[in-house]
Image: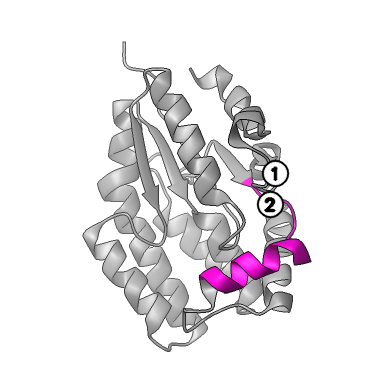
Amino acid sequence: MTAKGLFISFEGIDGAGKSTHIAALVDRCRAQGRTVTQTREPGGTPLAESLRELVLHQPMDALTEALLVFAARRDHLQQVIEPALSRGDVVVSDRFTDATFAYQGAGRGFDTSVLTQLERWVQNDGSGAIRQPDITGLPPVFTESLWPRTFFISSSKPSGLNFSMASFISASYVSDMGRNFLRLFNTVIFEDDTIPVSLHPFNTLYNSMASFF
């Protein structure tokens, strides 16, 4: 019998600890005998990675950026995520649609009603439902203690964050979850990664997956 596929996303700004938690969770899933597809957004396929480069390094208006992000997501879903879930894999993605509402919506002030419509078109799973992660890991609201690390990671990028923008986008993740009660219910807010992984509350996230195994 094929195991049920499980879709997990990790959200948050650069430097918030996503990579640490993703690596630990992937290791634990594999130790349980599950096949894991680890991926990221924007990206995850050759086409989506090319679009990612445009979004990160080319100037464009907010609508163009949103269209490219959702185009990348559509290819990612069709080529990677949906096939992996059909096989029964655990799919772990560094960001998904919540990032679009946080960065393009809150960060760039783009019309969220347009983002919602794009989400409906692009993430339709074929049955009329919108494909969303089963569970999302989210770091706590950004604090000044995380800023030096975040600045180091993001300052080399053309769109490098300043502290106030990093705080605003981080907080917008939490408010964004409220747009869909099910998304809020299935979100686990984890602590910063100063805690050793072996003792980390990411276990809460793993334990919340129990019903899917």
Q: Are marks 2 and 1 in contact (CB under 8 Å)?
A: yes
Apparent side of residue 209 relative to residue 204 in the rendered image (left or right):
left
> Residue under circle 2?
177
Is label 2 in a helix, a strand or a loop? Answer: helix
Apparent side of residue 130 relative to residue 35 in the rendered image (left or right):
right
Q: Where is residue 139 shown, x and y percent of the image?
A: 67, 50
Q: Where is residue 5 shown, x and y percent of the image?
A: 40, 28
Q: Residue at position x 66%, y 41% from top?
A: 187
CA distance for labels 2 and 1: 5 Å
Magenta span contains residue 203: no
Picture mark count: 2
Considering only order in the chain, which callout, 1 or 2, is on the residue closer to the N terminus? 2
Identify the disc placed on residue 184. Answer: 1
Q: Where is residue 80 shown, x and y percent of the image?
A: 29, 45
Q: Residue at position x 47%, y 64% from top?
A: 118
Residue 4 visible to the viewer: no
Foreground residue among 199 and 159: 199
Residue 1 visible to the viewer: yes
Amino acid on which disc 2 is placed = Met
Per the picture, the main secondary structure of the magenta-coloured stretch is: helix
